[in-house]
Amino acid sequence: MALSGNKGEWSEIYTLFRLLGEGKIHAGDANMNKLDLYYPILSIIREESKRYEYKPDTEQHIVVIDENGVERVRISMDKFMQESRFLLNEILAANDSAFEIPTSESFMNTIGCTKLKAPSSDKADIHIVIHDLRTNMTPLLGFSIKSQLGSAATLLNAGKPTNILYRVCAMELTDAQIDEINAIESHKSRMSAISEMGGRVQYADIEHDTFKNNLLFLDCGMPLFIAECLLEDSLPDSVSDIKEIVARVAAKNPLQFTGRNVESFYEHKMKVLLLDTALGMTSAKEWNGKYDANGGYIVVRSDGEIVCYHFYNRNDVEDYLYNNTRFERASRKRYEYGKLFRSDDGNVYVRLNLQIRFKK
């Protein structure tokens, strides 16, 4: 059966071909520009039904070695570059949500790849042994791949675990008024209606205990901070850009920070959340602080260039995530986003939902 996948899935194979063709990976700045700093690639390891290692030799070839240490095939790096260019053009030209690329699949079979996405229980999409020229270390690192060739990827997926509960205060709402507000289609208009009727919305709780504990694991002020960010994103004049939302929350200073640089205080909190989410933390599994994608991020730019955000350069990874992410409102039908309801305690609450997506 022919392989079929979306642009993001084919981008993982493109990344494999391109890195093996170049034999190195360049670092990127916060705006995804290529830096002079690069890391030579000593090998790439991919595990499917079998484990294969791809190692550059001294004669500009890639040696494909199976799990028994036996050489399967030896192919020039130029061939990998040629295949990566062909694959990139096919990805960019594709119009369907899922599509086949028989020529690329044939080359994949030659080098032992039978799947677009290597099975993984963690957030690492590719495992690379790099040579860090500054430290002279040669670690095996897992990297998460994000591609701009298709639709924008999510950093934190929406789901019931990311529901955040707010109490509607300073007003008494009848059941008829609750129904009236819930009938308003636009989320911002619903939230504005509460304010226009004299009410205000106040953070109450994170509904899912695991996600609440994960946020507390990061920082005891994180639940309130994130809740305030989502409220800010619900205002009539708000934008979804995370950097701007954090600046607005910092101006209100809900955690009452008394230091000199209030905005840096909140910026740091958001960067902690983004980094831990990017490299390991999920909303439904208890977080222990251990990164799965311990190498960092690899980004396939819209022009096909590839840049790396190595965790050794933590500030670069944080700046990339901070500058390139936004809040996204989840499905109202699936997660009751923005829906008012009366609880058993008689109070009226509204649910918002945390979802974070890359801008592009």
Image (tube, rainbow, N blue to C red):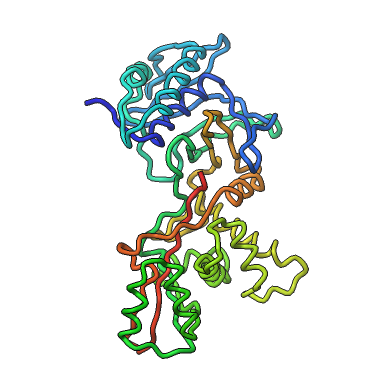
- Viewer can see residue 92: yes
Question: Which residue in the rendered view is the most extreme toward the top?
Answer: 59
Question: Which residue in the rendered view is the most extreme toward the right?
Answer: 260
* 324 is higher (above) or lower (below) than 333: above
> Where on the picture, by quarter, is residue 91?
top left
Asked if residue 180 lies left or right of residue 264, the reply is: left
Asked whether 29 or 317 is in front, the reply is: 29
Q: Residue at x 66, y 43 (%)?
A: 313
Q: Residue at x 34, y 88 (%)?
A: 174
Residue 189 position, x and y percent, is 44, 70
Asked whether 210 or 359 is in front, the reply is: 359
- Viewer can see residue 210: no
> Where on the picture, by quarter, is residue 53?
top left
**Placement of the N terminus among the 4 image quadrants:** top left
Residue 293 position, x and y percent, is 50, 43
Residue 168 position, x and y percent, is 44, 82
Residue 321 position, x and y percent, is 57, 49
Asked if residue 10 lies left or right of residue 320, the reply is: left
Total numbered labels placed on residues in the image = 0
* 169 is higher (above) or lower (below) than 56: below
Asked if residue 251 lies left or right of residue 119, the reply is: right
> Where on the picture, by quarter, is residue 11?
top left
